[in-house]
Amino acid sequence: MEARDRAGLADMNPAPKSVADIGSFITMISAACDDPAVSKRLEQLLEMPDEKRQGLVHAWVTDLLVAQAPRDFVQAIACLMDDRIAEKAYEVIVNCSRGDGRPYSATR
């Protein structure tokens, strides 16, 4: 089952072509770079083993859908179901929080 289906987002069309098309995901990562509290919470989530992270993200997305949270926020959180996206997000957030100043490149 695809991550979008598990997250209850399969009916939200059109599907973004990449995570870069989800502006709220970029905003969430930027917020983590700017706010130590957001950074810490996302780091804790992203440090988890993949299955545990996926389960928590799935539950979070389900709660957000039930609460009728803004669609773009739900999509941003749902991106964290994907192992590669979660790994890159973690890398970016850790680099920001350590203040190494390196610009992020998707080709790293």
Image (cartoon, rainbow, N blue to C red):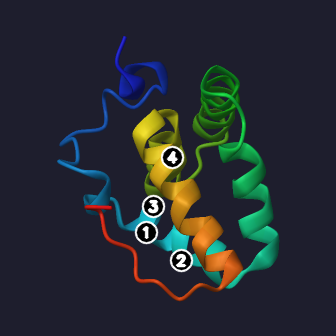
Question: Looking at the image, do the residues carrying marks 1 and 3 touch, with CB atoms under 8 Å apart?
Answer: yes
| Distance between mark 4 and mark 2 Cα atoms | 16 Å
The three-letter amino acid code for the residue at tag 4 is Glu
Tell me the residue at 67%/41% (across/down).
67
Establish if 43 lies above or below 50: below
User: Disc 1, disc 4: CB below 8 Å?
Assistant: no
Instruction: Find the distance from the CA under tag 3 to the CA under tag 2.
Output: 9 Å
Residue linked to disc 2 = 30
Residue underneath mark 4 = 87
Q: Position of residue 74 (x, y in %)?
A: 52, 47
Q: Are marks 3 and 2 in contact (CB under 8 Å)?
A: no
The residue under label 1 is: 26
Which mark sits nearer the N-terminus, 1 or 4? 1
| Residue 69 image point, x, y percent | 59, 50
Q: How many marks?
A: 4
User: Mark 4 Cα within 10 Å, few/some/many (few <14, many 20+)?
Assistant: some
* Residue at 18% from the left image edge and 43% from the top image edge: 14
Screen quadrant of the N terminus: top left
Q: Which residue is labeled 3 in the image?
A: 25
Residue type pointed to by label 2:
Ser
The answer for how far apart the CA atoms under marks 1 and 2 are is 6 Å
Tag nearer the camera, 4 or 2: 4
> Which secondary structure, mark 3?
helix
User: Secondary structure beneath disc 2?
Assistant: helix
Report crowding for label 3: few under 14, some 14 to 19, many 20 or more residues within 10 A (C-alpha). many
Q: Is 3 positioned to the left or the right of 28 in the image?
A: left
Q: Earlier in the sequence, mark 3 or mark 2?
A: 3
